[in-house]
Image (spheres, grey):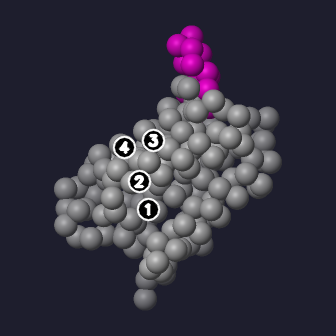
Amino acid sequence: MNRSLLSLVFGAIGLLLLQLFVTDQIGFLGFINPLVYMLIFVVYPFDNNRLLFIILAFFYGLVMDTFHDSGGAHAAACVTLAFARPYLLKLVYGESYLMKNLKPLRTEFSRLLLFLSLAILLHHLVYYSFIFFNTSEILHILRYTLLVGLATMLVNVVILLFVKPRKR
């Protein structure tokens, strides 16, 4: 097993544990719990197998559903994010992201933040749409998406600042 794959596996497990034992306990204002586990979808290498990534995203979300008893909402949001990831990458990095062999943590921080914010928006919209599952609750869906999304963005940026390699 190569070093980057091993660090990715340990990172995914670490984010799951951080989510389950730390950020799930925050409960700011009674409902704001940052979802840091989804950061793995941002730092996953651009050039890896897409089908495998979607399958792994499903099981990653299923683990979260098991602990949160959310009936598949995490799995649906993770699979949607994994499926839409190439389109978000093309939107943020342009068509050239495939040809440059970019590493997510080695890219410009402003583009990484834009990609992170789009990923959080998509993930949270899908997640809270499945949680509420009622069109009359659209304002609640948007409120939760915005407030939890801001908290998620803040915590994920702090994590990225610790993890992102410094330029020499």
Q: Determine which residue is flagged by label 1.
A: 44
Q: Residue 79 shows which numbered tag? A: 3
Looking at the image, the residue that sits furthest to the top is: 136
Visible residue check, residue 55:
yes
Q: Residue at (70%, 58%) from the top-left corner?
A: 17
Q: Residues within 10 Å of mark 4 (few under 14, many from 20)?
A: some
Q: Are marks 1 and 3 in contact (CB under 8 Å)?
A: no
Amino acid type, callout 2: Phe
Q: Is residue 18 left or right of residue 168?
A: right
- The amino acid type found where label 1 is placed reads Tyr
Q: Amino acid at mark 4?
A: Phe
The reply to whether residue 114 is visible in this rendering is no
Magenta-drawn segment: 131-146
Q: Indicate which disc residue 83 carries.
A: 4
- Residue displayed at 47% across by 72% down: 5
The Cα atoms of the two marked residues, 1 and 3, are separated by 14 Å
- The nearer-to-camera label among 2 and 4 is 2
Q: CA distance from mark 1 to mark 2?
A: 9 Å
Estimate the spatial distance between the alpha carbons at disc 4 and disc 3, rounded to whole Å. 6 Å
Q: Nearer the viewer, residue 147 or 89?
A: 89
Q: Are marks 2 and 3 in contact (CB under 8 Å)?
A: no
Q: Tell me: residue 72, above or below residue 12.
A: above
